[in-house]
Amino acid sequence: LPMIRHYSSDELPGAPSYSDLTVDAHGVLYAGSGEGVMVLRSGVWELFELPRRGAVYSLQAAPRGGVYVGGASALGLLQVDATGRLVYQDLLPAMAEVDPALALASFYGLKRAGNSIYVRYGSTLYELQQGGRIIPKSIPEGAAQRSYTVGQAVYIRIGGTGLVRMEGPVTEKLPGSEVFAQRSVVGMWAWRDGLLIAAEDGFYHGATAGIVRLASDADAEYDRIITIDLD
């Protein structure tokens, strides 16, 4: 078994509540809290307070080290510089240039696809590129709250339509995904030559030719359950 180290609340630099956890490309651990980002390096904890001292809601490891931070009036990139100091790049001013309403917005559910980080606000999906460029993309009407990232793309269920795939400037409906027009999707992963999709009534395989349900021993039980809209 791997060695397990327990840290008590007395050893942590912030309140012992964890909104999110991630580890960056250099092995640095980051934990979100109501007081900022708790950082663990070489067995030593420290607390990094955000510029507006907001709570942290979401963390996503950056492709080249460091972590993107989303929270109450907070969106930025936290990195360790060459001297070992924690440095924060505040992205809210850049977001406000795209839309002034985002100047003090709160952000949840950061996701990574390829080398970009995605964050959703309202009916817009924002792509945060490595060079600091921010690209807004309109989400089709009827979109569920949850989104999923597999490979280079973001996938969202659109009520009454099915699944759409958003990658670069392209937004396209997946062939055969109308099966999800009235059926909730709860998970998605890369699998074989396509996607493994978890829905409220079982698992589906999505490929170029379309989407098919995977038979399982649980089918009879699924048929008995009254499904609930999970989106």
Image: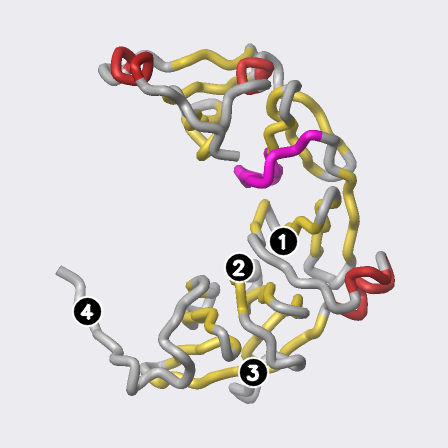
Give the label, 2 or 3, closer to the camera.
3
Sequence-wise first label, 2 or 3: 3
Q: Amino acid at mark 3?
A: Glu
Question: Percent position (x, y) of residue 158?
Answer: 64, 27
Q: Which residue is mark 1?
A: 117
Q: Amino acid at mark 2?
A: Gln
Sequence-wise first label, 4 or 2: 4
Sequence-wise first label, 1 or 3: 3
Question: Percent position (x, y) of residue 178?
Answer: 59, 14
Sequence-wise first label, 4 or 3: 4
Q: Nearer the viewer, residue 230 or 75?
A: 230
Q: Which residue does the image show at 54% across and 79% down from the upper left? A: 80
Question: Percent position (x, y) of residue 155?
Answer: 60, 34
Q: Which mark is residue 4?
A: 4
- The alpha-carbon separation of the residues under discs 1 and 3 comes to 22 Å
Question: Percent position (x, y) of residue 165?
Answer: 64, 30
- Mark 3 lies on a secondary structure that is loop
Sequence-wise first label, 2 or 1: 2
Quarter of the N terminus within the rendering? bottom left
Instruction: Note whether 42 is above or below 152 in the view shown.
Output: below
Q: Classify residue 44 as left or right of residue 94.
A: left
- The alpha-carbon separation of the residues under discs 1 and 4 comes to 31 Å
Q: Which residue is mark 2?
A: 60
